[in-house]
Amino acid sequence: MSELLLTAYDGSILGPIAKVLGWVMNGVYSLMEMIGIENVSLSIFIFTILVYSCMFPLTYKQQKFSKLSQKMQPELQAINKKYKDKKDQASMMAMNEETQAVYEKYGVSMMGSCAQMLIQMPLFFALYRVFMNVPAYITSVKGAFLPLVEGIMKTEGFADKMTTLVTDLRIATFPTVDFTVTDADVLTNYTVDVLNKLNTTGWDSLREAFPALTATIDSSYEVISDINSFFVFNISDTPWNIITTSFADKNFLMIFGALMIPVVSYLTQMLNIKLMPQASGGNDQNDAMAQQMKMMNRMMPLFSLFICFTVPVGLGFYWIVSALVRVVQQFFLNKHFEKIDLEDIIRKNQEKAKKKREKMGISENQIKNAARMNTRQMVDANRHQLSTAEKEAELEKANEFKANAKAGSMTAKANMVREFNERNNKK
């Protein structure tokens, strides 16, 4: 297993996550292999459904927060309106306290679904790494390359030929291949990485670079093509390369099929966004977040539309499958939330929050008293804050009052004591 992971992504955060996901995908492929099905595309399909099924509890929490957030927007808007023109510190503090009280009332966190997003985003990026380098994670796929790799490494000057191939075809690998190393295991993995990135044109270049291995290259290409096939496409090929090569051959059916991959990716993501509950405003911060979400919802499908032309077909297929899985989940979630009683959820959330505070030794009265005390202290502090000029004026008034004190008064006696002390200190 350690040899297998030599060319896996080795990032400190995403690397371990990618290895775990790769281990799961390897298990899916192995189970399919046991029943005679060896196809990475089908493995991606099953694996994607499995991953999104495991993440469904997080998705459910996000959707529940969105529904509760929509329900409490009128109260948040009322608070925002109440303190709209008040920018002093006491008012801002009171506004935050009232806003927090609304969130506590509905039993949700002010952070919303940020925790769920923080969990999901590393998974998505790690999955990207797995699909970009499948042989590093699926043992059987890597094994399909090994007979050809053995022949290549036995060819004299293979390191220079492979380096030239990488340069001419502009092949990008992670980590970057280096055929000047002497470790045979590392060279084997690097060679697999390069072969996995070859499109149809790249395999033709490989035949030219290693003419003595033409028969081995042809047989390996046939096996790997079956493993990597997605309908009539190779998942390692890019739609743009398919379009350009098919245009030269006037194969318009292939051109249409390659165009449909980014188009379908865009359409499925747009459908998913349409079904999702949309964020609404409530205060300036929520309005800004809502606008950012709308902008992201516009840009992400467009990003997938354009990027799908230049990434492997397998990654585009993953985006399509994942969007379709989210569409199905979202459809049933919408039906579910139409039937459930949100008021009941709010009551349960309030009870959970109350019990949590009680475990921490905080009572409801303590929270209310603390809120009132904080606001009162802030107001008192503002009231007693004096500028330098005001302090000097107050000091002059005090000195004047002392100088004009009546004989025999407490102030006059205090002045006499002060003068006596000052004379003694001078001696």
Image: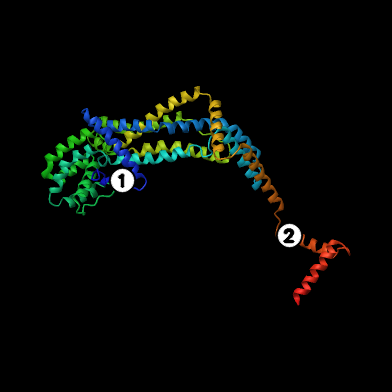
User: What x and y, as percent, mark residue 421?
Assistant: 78, 71
- Extreme-top residue of the structure: 339
Residue at left offset 31%, top offset 30%: 46
Local SS, label 2: helix
Would residue 240 appear left or right of 270 to someone viewing this image? left
Q: How is the image coloured?
A: rainbow
**Tag 1 residue:** 9
Amino acid, disc 2: Lys
Q: Is residue 169 visible?
A: yes
User: What x and y, as percent, mark residue 386?
Assistant: 71, 56
- Please name whichever residue, 232 or 221, is drawn nearer the observer in this view of the structure: 221
Disc number placed over residue 293 in the picture, else none? none
- Label 1 with label 2: CB-CB less than 8 Å: no
Local SS, label 1: loop
User: What x and y, as percent, mark residue 71?
Assistant: 56, 30
**Tag 2 residue:** 391
Residue at left offset 82%, top offset 63%: 402
User: What x and y, as percent, mark residue 257?
Assistant: 29, 31
Residue at left offset 15%, top offset 45%: 150
- Extreme-left residue of the structure: 212
The quadrant in which the C terminus is found is bottom right
Amino acid, disc 1: Tyr
- Please name whichever residue, 156 or 16, is drawn nearer the observer in this view of the structure: 16
